[in-house]
Image (cartoon, coloured by chain):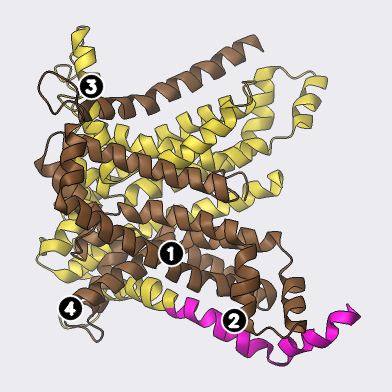
Amino acid sequence: MKSSKFGAWAAIILGVVYFLAPLLATFEFSLRMRRGEYSFDAYRVVLASGNFRDSFLYSTVLAFVTIIVGVLVVVPTAYWVQLRLPRLRGLVEFITLLPLVVPAIVLVFGYIKLYGSSSLLPLTATSLGADALLMFGYVGLGLPYMYRSVETALRAIDVRTLTEAAESQGAGILTILFHIILPNIRSGILSGAFLTFAIVIGEFTFASLLDRPAFGPYLQLIGASRAYEPSALAIIAFALTWACMGLIQLFGSGVRVSADKR
Amino acid sequence: MTTVAAPATRVLRFPNLAAWLGVAPFFVFAIMFLIAPTASLLVGAFQDHDGAFTLSNLARLWQPSIRLSYLLSIEVSLASAFSGALIGLALAIAALRGGLPGWVRPTLMTFSGVASNFAGVPLAFAFMATLGRLGFVTIVLRSVGFDIYAAGFNLFTFTGLTLTYLYFQIPLMVLVVAPAIDGLKAEWGEAAEILGAGRLQYWRMVVLPILWPSVLGASLLLFANAFGAIATAYALTGSFLNIVPILLYAQIRGDVLHDPNLGYALALGMLLITGLSNVAYLYLRARSDRWLK
């Protein structure tokens, strides 16, 4: 038993080294901008840059719209599948897994083919159309996580009783969905929302190929042209991811973070 | 149920209309933004310039430059999936079954949740700052007399890319395989011990047969995960390593293949590989769930 405990510690310690080394190294690198001494200059330069603020703001707004549309698409579906249409469950689950199967680069290629400027529905021809296309693409990227979080939360409450109770008080379906069901699955929605945010905020493939001024392409551009700013940005991005996961643990049921809750 | 039967009839009277209206946006979304775009590529892969049916696009995937791209992609994905699965499995077993203090497990799981989502461009930056020519680890190792670049290491190569991918592959493995390890019942270990099995025998004859579908399935998931990834590789190596996603990226940007239909075939090939890996993963997961429920 002793020896296996030793092996276990060794595995964990090696893991810690592999996973912490890049973080420490990146942090150290991000402080090197001023010659001969450590400083936060790289962060100052990044945060003061207009491109950083514009692209970050763009991606943040887009992430919020993505989350709202995602919730509007997913919650009624998961609700009705649970309550009335259980025979659709398999099909719906299959569709929600598609974004994990179809690589993002393939999906966006399909968008450009189907919604390009010479197509029937030329979404990419206008900037607003391209924004919408990117948003719908992100709803797709977040779909597996959003659906799972919401579905798990719905299973934990008694949807049928809540619905019947609300109906007996004369509530319509919209009231039921938005005033009864939604508050009761808040934790699941928040989990899905934060995960969606973490995925969307620095996404590169969609944004770059749809030519949108998002944070991901900005990151790539800085990486190709600057020395110390990329490290500062990597630290900022890591802190953001960490914050999203922390918020999931805080508010949510930790649906995907701890995969043992299936 | 009799007391609630009356209000319930209201839903029952128009059951399907309301329900179908409720799920309609989901299906419209799925068709417009998931199914139709993918399907249109699949159709395009079988068409020539004039829209007539042809298999020549698929045949032309066999030309050396594209074939080598696929080969490189498969090699990178295999290497990162195989080592990621092994290391992730070892970490998960250590944290879940190694008799370590209680805080190890939740810490590892939370960190895995973060790290498996920390991919893309920032991950490439982090590894450049770590193992690039001026990276922290490179400098530290050089100061103790070991110059990894002189020894032949280069971050912007196959090895470097694989090492970088492991940063999200290992945590993903931990997350995916943890439930399977949790499913190993303590009784099985006790039964094996009572029957006189040694530790090694228990692992070889009880754990391995139960765990292998999960481990293999998870490895396939990791493989598909690496195969479709582009942002990390692009930010790290530019178009220096010509893996399929990067070739496809270049094709979408500037039609480097000089033939959109060949591009569609390239996408079809990617989809086939990630699709088959995922189907096999789901099959193996269903198989292991039988034991672990």
Marks 2/3: CA distance?
Answer: 56 Å
Above/below status of A29 relative to B275: above
Q: Residue tagged by mark 2?
A: A174
Question: Which of label 3 and label 1 is nearer to you?
Answer: 1
Find disc 4 in the rendering and name its residue: A125
Q: Disc 2 to disc 1, how far (Cα)?
A: 19 Å
Q: Earlier in the sequence, mark 2 or mark 4?
A: 4
The chain to which mark 4 is attached is: A
Q: Could you say where residue A188 lies in the image, as x and y percent from the top left? A: 57, 58
* Disc with the residue nearer the chain's start (4 vs 1): 1
Disc sitting over residue A210 in the figure: none
Numbered circle sitting on residue B136? 3
**In the depicted structure, whether residue A110 falls above or below residue A257:** below
- Left or right of A218, for residue B3: right
At mark 1, the secondary structure is helix
Q: Residues within 10 Å of mark 1 (few under 14, many from 20)?
A: many
Residue type at mark 3 is Phe
Which of the 4 quarters of the picture holds residue B50?
bottom left
* Chain with colour brown in the figure: A
Distance between the Cα atoms at labels 4 and 1?
Answer: 24 Å
Secondary structure found at label 2 = helix
> Which mark lies nearer to you, 2 or 4?
2
Q: Which residue was labeled with disc 1?
A: A67
The magenta span reads B1-28
* Mark 4 and mark 1 on one chain: yes
